[in-house]
Amino acid sequence: MSTFLLVLLCFSKTIYFVWVGYQKIIDVTIKDAPFHKFIVFACMNISVFILSFTFDFFGLYLINPTNYEGMPVNYSNPRLLFEFLFFSLQQFTFFGYGNLLPSSVLAKILSMLELTISFLTVLFILSDFNSLKESLLTRVEARKDEDE
């Protein structure tokens, strides 16, 4: 039951972070903020995702260590946190070395969720942000013209 609750909370916080991130992107775009402010926001958002999933993986491991293969059993909690931070960073950057593997369905679901968020984040950042910005500003100006 605690495993299911952890995964449910993970999905909920991920939806929340994605929604808040989307709203922030719209705000930054409409206010015509400088590009460097968007990059700072994106870096902070990525950091929150990586740290958040680190604690999700760590919690899932504490509930049942068989959720992951490749983790030595004699590690202290700070070392486990470091290992899961490393694992989360590997997943977010698509560099998975394979030294730690999710073995349960729920661990795989959490991993897939982080990989999906990672892919969408990288896709968005690598896309032409300025085109998105111009498109949104054009829509805002069109609405202003309609209201007048």
Image (cartoon, helix red, strand yellow):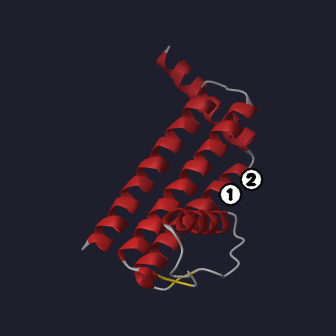
**Residue 86's mark?**
none
Task: State the residue position of label 1.
Answer: 123
The residue nearer to you, when weighing 7 against 51, is 51
Task: State the residue position of label 2.
Answer: 126
Mark 1 crowdedness (10 Å alpha carbons): few <14, some 14-19, many ≥20: few
Q: Does residue 21 lie above or below 123 as drawn?
A: above
Residue type of the residue flagged with mark 2 = Leu
Q: Position of residue 36 (x, y in %)?
A: 74, 33
Q: Does residue 147 lie above or below 126 as drawn?
A: above
Check disc 1 and report its element: helix, strand or loop.
helix
Q: Are marks 1 and 2 in contact (CB under 8 Å)?
A: yes
Residue displayed at 60% across by 68% down? 83
The residue nearer to you, when weighing 65 against 95, is 65
Outermost residue, left side: 1
Residue type of the residue flagged with mark 1 = Leu
- 96 to the left or right of 23: right
Quarter of the image for residue 8 reads: bottom left
Q: Position of residue 43 (x, y in %)?
A: 66, 45
Residue displayed at 35% across by 74% down? 63
- 70 to the left or right of 23: right
- 100 to the left or right of 6: right
Q: Position of residue 62 (x, y in %)?
A: 40, 72
